[in-house]
Image: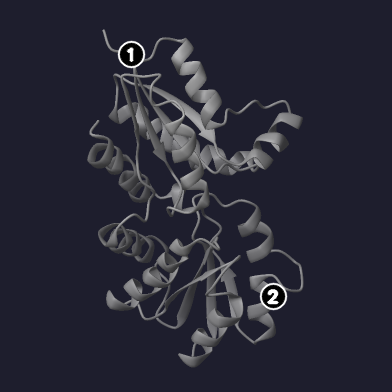
Amino acid sequence: MSKKAIVCVSFGSSYENTVEKTIKKIEEDFAKEFSGFEIRRAFTSSIIIGVLKKRGIETDNLPLALEKLEKEGFNEVYVQPTHFIAGHEYEKLKKQADEFKNKFDVLKVGVPLLFDEKDIENVCKITAEEISPSEDEALVLMGHGTDHSVNYVYTKTDEMFKKLGCKNIFVGTVEALPDIGSVINMVEEKGFKKAVLSPFMLVCGDHANNDMWGDEDDSWKNSFIKKGFETRVVLKGMGEYENIRKIIVSHAHKYLGV
């Protein structure tokens, strides 16, 4: 009899309450959808794994999760990432999984949330519906950003919002382009005086609480306030929205064939 497992792989978060609201919810969704599968967790961030270990919380990285499954006699393993884009972290987990390709009868790696144009369109529609800014508000979404070539996905997402008629939704990034300065310029050009800030990330963790809504002088909140914007926040990770989680589950069906 086949022993089957799905490993839900996330970047990770040291904010326990956000893990409960997002990563754990995704794992619960997978448990409901795939009743014949063991559901396991892995994080790709060694820094976050280290922070959690100091608190007495043990979290596997992907190699350790796969080693355990091999020892326990699993022969079909499906790795489903919860990452937004196919950047460095995604390439890392694919390479790590590849080291185990001869250890199982079946070992497949799924795709991230924003994998193709249809994914981007669906995520844009869900985001606009869930956050639903008023017409006189600019909704500014904070993505992570990367120096990987796939960073273009953030610009593509911004363009998709406009294509769908959401002229008041803008996408920026913390660590790449479009940066906060570029986004403020775009919002000002459109004549908005009110801004709603929300994370365009799976969890509402460090970037959302500090870079976006923190009290530091250069936080996104204070950058908008200094420019005279009436500013509010929606502190919810994208993984808190059920329909976003449904896309991740659908990817397991579509790309992993489970």
Identified by mark 2, the residue type is Asn
Q: Where's the N terminus, which quadrant?
A: top left
The answer to which of 173 and 94 lies nearer the viewer is: 94
Q: Where is residue 238 drawn, in percent x and y?
A: 45, 53
Please state the horizontal and vertical placement of residue 154, each as a whole percent of the image: 44, 67
In terms of secondary structure, where does tag 1 sit?
loop
Which residue carries the number 1 mark? 3
Disc sitting over residue 222 in the figure: 2
Residue at position x 46%, y 29% in the image: 99
Q: In which quadrant is the C terminus drawn? A: top left
SS at mark 2?
A: helix
Figure check: 124 above or below 74 = below
* Kind of residue sitting beneath label 1: Lys
Q: Is residue 204 shown above or below 148?
A: above
Q: In terms of sequence position, does the residue under pointer 1 or pointer 2 come before the other? A: 1
Q: Is residue 217 left or right of residue 6?
A: right
Quadrant of res 210: bottom right
In-image side of 23 versus 2 (left or right): right
Residue 213 seen anywhere in this rendered image of the structure = no
